[in-house]
Amino acid sequence: MHLQASLQWKPREVRQQTMTNEVLLCLTVFIPTLGALTLPILGGLSTKLRNFIAFGLVAAALIGSLSLLPAVLKGQTVTWQSMQLAGLGISLQADALAVFMAIVSSLVSAIIVAYSSSYVSHYTHQNEYYLMVVLFLGAMMGLVFAANLILLYVFWEITAIASWRLIGFFREKSYVAKADKAFLVTAFGALSMLLGFVVIYAQTGSFDLARIKGTALPDLAVVLIMLGILSKSATLPFHTWLPDAGVAPSPVTALLHAAVLVKIGVYVFARLFIVTFTYGADWHTVFMVLAAVSALVSAGAALIDTDLKRIIAYSTVSQIAFIFLGFAAGNEIGVAGALLYILMHGVAKGGLFLCAGIVEQKTHTKDIRQMGGLVKTMPITAVSFLLCSLSVMGVPPFGGFFSKYMVISGAVQSDHLWLAATFVFGAVLTILYLFRAFNQVFLGTPLGQTPREGSPIMVGSVALLAAMSLLSGLIIQPSAQFAYTAVRQMLGVVAK
Amino acid sequence: MNGMLLLPIVLPFLAGAAALLLGRRAGALGGPLAVVATAINLVVAIVLFRQGGEVTFVAPWATLGMEFSLRAYQFSNFIVLAAAGFGLLVSLYCVKFMCDRKHANQFYCYMLISLALVNGAVLANNLIAMLFFWEGLLGALFGIIAIGRPGAWKTATKAFVIVGISDLCMMLGIALTYHLAGTLTISKINLPLGGLGAVAMILMMIGAISKAGSMPFHSWIPDAALDAPLPFMAILPASLEKLLGIYFLARISLDMFQLSAESWISPLMMIIGAVTILLAVMMALVQKDYKRLLSYHAISQVGYMILGIGTCLPIGIVGGLFHMINHAMYKSCLFLTGGSVEKQAGTTDLAKLGGLARKMPITFGCFIVAAASISGVPPFNGFFSKELVYDAALERGILFYVAALLGSFFTAASFLKLGHAAFLDKGRNENAGVTEAPRSMLIPMVVIAALCVVFGVWNGLPLHNFIQPALAGSHFGQLNAHEIGDYSGMHGSRVLLIMTALSLLGALANHLWGAKVSGSGLGAADHIHHAPSLSWAYDRAAQRQFDPYDLVLKLLAVVSNILWRLDRANDWIYDRFTVGLTMTLSRGVRLAHGGNYAMYVLWAILAAAAVLVFLVKS
């Protein structure tokens, strides 16, 4: 409303620019969500066309979010509202936080979809696969740009349904049970969150994020919303669905576990608990302690488990806790670190899962005890795995170094030295479990099998992600600057 | 011209990247490439050093206090110069040594990149920029060990984990320092050592002494001595890592924190130093392998440097820093002699060596000079720096002095044993055809050995030009300007000199007696090895029961097992408990809907009664 009023006073070019941005925002959300529905039809015509269009839809989301970049970097917020029917309508907004998240999600998703075209090419139900993957990404775009709580909830549940179908992609009975588990746990969280939204509505009379900004949340609403966030972001004690979901095809696990799905929870945390609402100060400490327990328990589990994909999934649970730590610290360096962590972890962990996918496809096993010495025959996959691991460990010059330091520094800045030390211990465990996996799979004594390197497009994807992990650290300035802009906007350091 | 500060970082880095691209051709071309790159790097370092004064370079970077800032001043220039010197000499050595090795391209890549990173860490004036380079060494460290003999990746992982853990401690220390000081710019930090300040300093100190290879972060070094390519030992653990670690230890002790002799951290550092000296030298004494014996001395000698700086006395700090540069020289020289022996005789197992003195006279000569230096024999450089450390240690406590002196005794004993066994003992027949090493390998050794003499006889040269000016900018320099005297020439009291002489003569007597009893140079330390309670400890050490790395890993295995069980218990709630609960509940409900007509009538009556009660009540 406010924006529309101010529109009248702006010169024509500015108005046009604002209009263009609004159109771009709509396109970014609706092209993948609606376009996904055409994929099964296209699949009937030509698989190549379908794969190409699927990639195009995700790329469109990426280009759309990139095109919003100039506006948000200037500190503007782009908003768009549909016609209101009976008080309900679609309202979207793009600020630096949302655009950052959208770029990260669509960037990694684009690589994953490219990888998929080779990975799933000899399985059935491909139409459904592409429908769900692109719909998932579209829902993610809707979720990050949603400007009211109900819309956010709707997109949240669309991602849940899409991931439920994708986890159970291979249709085996035990796999489907695990898909159900993932759905039930996250849906339980989502329903609690919806209850929390109702509590907020009872207090404020609105679901509109801009209108309810600055509301002090009652503890009940905090608890209910956190149940949703923790279950979606697979944080203790709601995390076990994530390792179980490793039965999904590897591109899916990369998409769900690394790049997009688990980041939904932390994104909504940032959106609601940092940008929109205020709440009791003690909760900061509670969230950080919860994150610390989650980081340690899952890291310990990653050191014991012997299934490659489960190890990486536990690692995701552990790393998500680092993101929570940064956001919960709530200061500039912590929040900026958490944002960078979302980027660095998405890229590197996506790479790890895709490497695991190549290994799994070529060796026909996920058990690391039955692998060894693969570096000889799969050198590019091995090196990519190592580079992505180094980024997850937070070793410079990889991007993960900066984000890890910043979230730990954020915890120290908020006077939680012991929690910061706990997370450093978690980082030590990270080094150990990733090396354990790498050494067991790629070094050591070969166990008879001499699998060949994966297909060019798959190997190319993982090499690209590894190179991005490295370059994002060597050239840290743009992403750090972006995160810094977003943080200043989020914390209200500069007037919008 | 401030951009010139980037050269020592960018040049070796690009050369390293180029070496990687050489692939198989690196065996022949990598050496010359490395020599040219390190030679240019040396020229740059000399220009920087001669330029003098303070030069800074600042570029925006990762925001929030993290800026890319470099600062060249007297102290950092000196370290960059020294590192450049070792870089060039070891590269020259590698031309012949590495020419027929597999993975030579990776070796040159990691070596040159390590040099770039060390330069970056030394020049950095922002703690995060420093950590960026410092911790970046991890990747190169892993790679350079892993390309050694088959199975070396285990040692590489061990090195990565140990150094990685201490780097993470340093990261926490840096975060805490930022919290306390409000800045990450090194030259602006000057924190008191109270409460959290001490914690921050300890955390950073862990990183520094771990890089230098002190106990308890040492145990990867002896393993790497056997597994990694030899020039790696000469350039990293022996020289560059010592320079970097001790440089940073000096920076945190002298500049960033107000460390004084009254603080409890001072005795802590001295204890770490003394324990490291003694335990590591005792292990060195009983080794039967040329390289492994040297590697334990690379640990032991760090103790002198930490002890010297830990005394918090100007004389001790000067001694510690002087010992740092001296050690880098004689230890890299010793490793290079080891490399010559390995290359020419095909083994470094002392039991298979012997009688090489005649066949490799120049190598033997260099060995004698370097061994005399490390043992603290006058007039070589090690003698002078050790005397300064002795002086300071005696002032802080007789026990520290005794530990340092005892360390010297065993050092001398073990080098007598090593020299005797490798070069003088009766040679075996296989060694008959051994010849002197090629010239490109001899030159670096001879140059370093000559420098050991120069730094000893004319010790004013390094002290006046490099060491003492470095101290001038510190809070020691500012606060007690009168106390920083001149430590060149023959320093120390006559009593100290006599004690040193006695310990050296004692070591000689001990060696002669041991050699006579056992019948060979190799067995000259056996009487200590098999001494009553010592042999028990040695046996267990040989079984690696004292390796801190293994102990910590065992502990972590237990911890992670507990965590894993917690995770499984959590999972049980979902997979069993919730499912079971739902089943039980639904079974109860199912009983109520059994299809029995009478039952349904009963439900209907009960419900009607409930409605009635509700209506009546309201």
Image (cartoon, coloured by chain):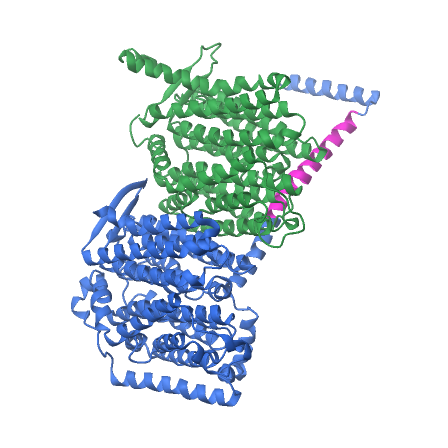
Chain colours: A green, B blue
Residue B231 is drawn in which quadrant? bottom left
- The reply, left or right, for residue A16 in relation to residue A433 is left
Residue A290 seen in render:
no
In x, y percent, where is residue B120? Answer: 32, 52
First to last magenta residue range:
B566-593
Residue B208 colored in magenta in the image? no
Query: Does the segment drawn in magenta span residue B580?
Result: yes
- Total tally of numbered discs in the picture: 0
**Residue A90: x and y, percent?**
47, 16
- Pick the front one: A198 or A38: A38
Residue in view at x 63 percent, y 34 percent: A248
| Nearer-the-camera pick, A320 or A69 | A69
Vertical arrangement, residue B615 with respect to residue A167, above or below: above
Nearest the viewer among A112 and B480 is A112
Residue A309 location in percent, x, y? Answer: 60, 42
Q: Main secondary structure of the magenta part?
A: helix
- At horizontal 44% and vertical 77% (from top left) the residue drawn is B359
State which quarter of the image contains the C terminus of chain B.
top right
Above or below: residue B484 compared with residue A50:
below
Q: Nearer the viewer, residue A310 or B81?
A: B81
Residue A294 on image: x %, y % = 52, 44
What's the residue at 20%, 53% (across, down)? Answer: B54
The answer to whether residue B188 is seen in the rendering is yes
